[in-house]
Amino acid sequence: MPPFVDGPVQVTVPATSANLGPGFDSLGLALSLRDELEAEVLPEGLVVEVEGAGAGSDGTGVPRDESHLVVRSMRAAFALMGEQPPGLRVSCRNVIPHARGLGSSSAAIVAGVVLARALVAGGQLLASDEALFDLAADLEGHPDNVAPAFYGGFVISGREDDRWYAVRAGVDPRITAVAFVPPTGVETKVARGLLPDVVPHADAAANSGRAALLVAALTGQPEHLLAATRDWLHQDQREPAMPETLALVRRLRADGVPAVVSGAGPTVLAFGATDTSALTASCPDGWACHDLAIEPDGAVLLT
């Protein structure tokens, strides 16, 4: 059996925004907001430490036991490699807001599988990048956030012949982003529960055309971003769970700003040029505003 390496090992993982308007469950971007995590093997037991998002001690924080998402993801990766450590310490410094549509769960999953592989001697031989990505997408259930969290940049992802795929594409260097984050979140399962089972063929056709245009706009023709980010499949349908989010999206788009619901919401992601000062001035009272770059790197081991 492979021995474990002397720890600790550290990883940093980016926030992500999925869908980007019409690219439902298929398009995702890595953003320059990163969680940092550390793990090491212990002789026994489990220690989970959390700072930042999810650290609340009033019942709002994340669990500190085997049900913690990073720990569950590490256990799955250890099982993939045929080994479980006798004990674990996991430390999380969370910057990515939880339940806001910025990929916090995908960041936790990707961090967990990468940390686990780094703790096993010869882990790269036992679990390739493709195998880890497949596992992370299986754990999340869809790849649109996991793919940019793992690989970085702009990624088109999906499932074909019972396998996940992820294809990176370049991003025009003129494109930046601003994330408007409301003070309260919306759980992904709630947002998904508002989506209809059937959509009109005309809406599906229009949406697929805009998704294709969005790839072209992000990779080199940002002047088309406003048209390319129009959605027919999920944003308006989710308005009952996040009315202020949709109001902000419409207000920004009326001013010519390519704005979308980030992931399942309720964060609003707006694309801009290098100078985003005018955009940040649009932040509603009580919301947080993050001036972000498109992050070229996904999960990065620091040790």
Image (tube, helix red, strand yellow):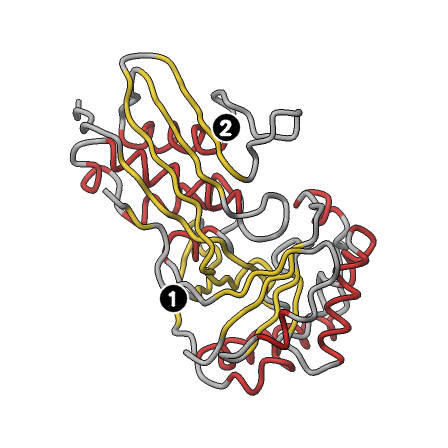
Task: Please name the residue that numbered disc 2 is placed on.
Answer: 68
Residue at 69 percent across and 46 percent down: it is: 185
Is 114 on the left-hand or right-hand side of 286?
A: left
The answer for how far apart the CA atoms under marks 2 and 1 are is 30 Å
Q: Residues within 10 Å of mark 2 (few under 14, many from 20)?
A: some
Tell which of 199 and 28 is nearer to you.
Answer: 28
Report x, y in % for residue 30.
Answer: 45, 60
Q: Residues within 10 Å of mark 1 (few under 14, many from 20)?
A: some
Is 221 on the left-hand or right-hand side of 248?
A: left
Residue at 57 percent across and 73 percent down: it is: 271
**Seen from this angle, which residue lies furthest top?**
44
Task: Please name the residue that numbered disc 1 is placed on.
Answer: 168
Tell which of 134 and 301 is nearer to you.
Answer: 301
**Mark sitting earlier along the chain (2/1):** 2
Query: Amino acid under label 1?
Result: Arg
At numbered mark 1, what does the secondary structure look like: helix, strand or loop? strand
Tell which of 245 and 71 is nearer to you.
Answer: 245
Contact (Cβ within 8 Å) of mark 2 with mark 1: no
Quadrant of residue 43 within the rendered picture: top left
Query: Amino acid under label 2?
Result: His
Report x, y in % for residue 130.
Answer: 32, 50
Q: How many numbered callouts?
A: 2
Tell which of 281 and 238 is nearer to you.
Answer: 281
Residue at 32 percent across and 37 percent down: it is: 115
Report x, y in % for residue 87.
Answer: 32, 17
**Rendered view: 213 above or below 282:** below
At numbered mark 2, what does the secondary structure look like: helix, strand or loop? loop
Name the disc covering residue 178, or none. none
Residue at 69 percent across and 83 percent down: it is: 256
